[in-house]
Amino acid sequence: MAAAALDHVGIVGRDLGVLAAAYEGLGFTLSPHAQHHAPGPDGVVRPLGTGNRCAMLGRGYVELIAIVDQALPSNTLDRFLARHAGAHILAFAVDDAEGELARLRAVGHPVPGIAWLERPVGTKDGVRTARFARLPLPDPPEGRVQLIQHLTPELLWQPHLIEHANRAVSLDAVIVAVADPDEASARLAPALGSAPEPVPGGVRIRLRRGELSLVTAEAAARLLPGLAVPSLPFIAGLVIGTDDGGRAAAAIAGHRARAAGAGLLVPPSDAGGAAILFV
């Protein structure tokens, strides 16, 4: 069994309000605005300059993230935005961060240790703190690629947050355009604990839940018609599962979407820089 499951994709924007409005306009329910915090070298937890809102799904989620305080550390978001706005974060869920740290080191990923992160979350009982144990892979060209253990999952997957007008229920797949799919899979598949499988134009890595496709730019454009690739590697699109075959998403998106294969495609220009394929 694969070590990791597809957890979330982070869409990085220059203005969190604009990004959130785009996703609400596509029928997603979003969590309230929250600012990230992390412990410093002295162990004291301090705010970071980044904040988010999330579209929590029954399985996985989409994180909308931006710099909300220019005076505080951007946690590399400024570097991502220098390339382009869009998807720059790939997170894969694991059950045991300590055990995965040892496994990553054994397969050749020199992860220095567990990075801790937290953020406030509103609940019916007041504001509580969601906590995460992260294992960021060192300097992957795709962006921020990390394994993550949710230490307080009940705070994120609250029942009222996983009900969406577009009937979205799951993050099923991520499509990444790369220059060399074999090279990319040789780096990422061992970290995810799963062997790659050949697909037209690249490879697919099946996970405990969901999958990651690493394909050429040409193959990505076939999967996501009309896609323009600004640079490689490029996290090009998300496949979002629905419980009605995409009918509600089609009605909400209207002229912004088009049929693509067995799904409904919303282009990157209407989804914060990453295409969404509703299926």
Image: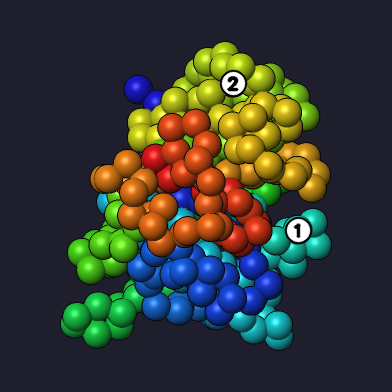
Residue 39 seen from this side:
no
Residue visible at 75% across and 58% down?
84
Q: At 53% across and 57% down in the image, what residue appears?
A: 255
The reply, left or right, for residue 218 in relation to residue 109 is right
Q: Secondary structure at mark 2?
A: strand
Whether residue 6 is situated above or below residue 273 in the rendered picture = above
In the structure shown, which secondary structural element does the residue marked by tag 1 occupy? loop
Residue 271 x, y percent position in the rendering: 57, 59
Q: Is residue 276 above or below residue 195?
A: below
Q: Amino acid at mark 1?
A: His
In this view, which residue lies farthest toward the front? 255
Extreme residue in the top direction: 198
Position of the C terminus, as image quadrant, is top left
Q: Residues within 10 Å of mark 2 (few under 14, many from 20)?
A: many
Check disc 2 and give the amino acid type. Answer: Val
Image coords of residue 187 (percent x, y): 65, 28
What residue sits 61% from the left and 81% below the top?
68
Front residue of 211/75: it is 211
Question: Which quadrant of the figure has residue 175?
Answer: top right
How far separated are the C-alphas under marks 2 and 1?
25 Å
Which quadrant holds residue 107? top right
The residue sitting at 59% across, 21% down in the picture is 203
User: In terms of depth relative to the viewer, which is nearer, 153 or 110?
Assistant: 153
Task: Reply above or below: 256 against 21.
Answer: above
- What residue did someone put label 1 on? 84
For residue 203, which numbered disc appears in the image?
Answer: 2
- Residue 168, how many percent across, how many down? 34, 52
Q: Which is more N-terminal, label 1 or label 2?
A: 1
